[in-house]
């Protein structure tokens, strides 16, 4: 069960990372991201933020996979995985709050749901994971 939760959490974060990369590359989807305040292409500052968000999301996903024992956790310090996974779950829960207060209906529906699901999945992995 923990492995399934970890892989599902990683998949959600990878999909959101892909969306962030599309925004960084100039996709005209700004109206459903970053609070829905910018229609079309994002300005340079938000495109840079999206470019930075993508690898962070993938790192978070990798940490969750390591906590579940799906990938080798050896590059990380002993005892870091459990608190890091709880931290990721908390950050995703906070991000869910930001998403559901967006002026964009699509951001509320798509990303509010995605981050809520990922937060719960990360909490399951944090609670039941095998890695340190």
Image: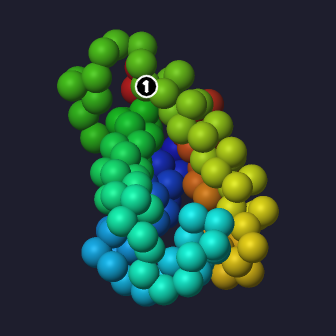
Position of residue 74 relative to residue 90, above or below, is above
Q: 51 or 9, which lies in front?
A: 51
Give coordinates of residue 78: x percent, y percent: 34, 13
Question: Which residue occupies the extreme left position in the image?
Answer: 75
How many numbered discs, if any? 1
Label 1 secondary element: helix
Q: Residue at x 57, y 64 (%)?
A: 34
Circle 1: is it few (<14), some (14-19), or many (20+) Cα within 10 Å? many
Residue at 34% over, 51% down = 52
Q: At which x and y percent is residue 45? A: 40, 59
Note whether 101 is above or below 38 in the view shown.
above
Q: Is residue 25 left or right of residue 64?
A: left
Q: Is residue 116 visible?
A: no
- Position of residue 130 relative to residue 122, above or below, is above
Residue depicted at x 41% and y 43%: 60
- Which residue appears farthest toward the top when viewing the image? 78
The residue that disc 1 covers is 81
Q: Is residue 74 visible?
A: yes
Assign the C terminus to one quadrant of the image: top left
Q: Quadrant of residue 72?
A: top left
Q: Measured from the top left, where is residue 128 in percent x and y? A: 58, 32
Quarter of image, res 105: bottom right
- Side of 38 where 35 appears, left or right: right
- The image quarter containing residue 19 is bottom left
């Amino acid at each position: 069960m923990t492995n399934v939760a970890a892989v599902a959490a990683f998949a959600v974060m990878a999909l959101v990372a892909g969306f962030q990369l599309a925004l960084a590359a100039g996709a005209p989807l700004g109206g459903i991201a970053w609070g829905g305040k910018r229609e079309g292409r994002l300005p340079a500052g938000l495109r840079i933020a999206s470019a930075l968000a993508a690898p962070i999301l993938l790192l978070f996903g990798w940490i969750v996979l390591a906590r579940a024992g799906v990938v080798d956790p050896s590059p990380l310090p002993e005892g870091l995985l459990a608190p890091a996974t709880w931290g990721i779950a908390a950050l995703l829960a906070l991000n869910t709050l930001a998403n559901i207060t967006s002026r964009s209906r699509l951001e509320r529906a798509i990303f509010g749901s995605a981050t809520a699901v990922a937060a719960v999945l990360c909490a399951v992995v944090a609670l039941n994971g095998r890695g340190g």
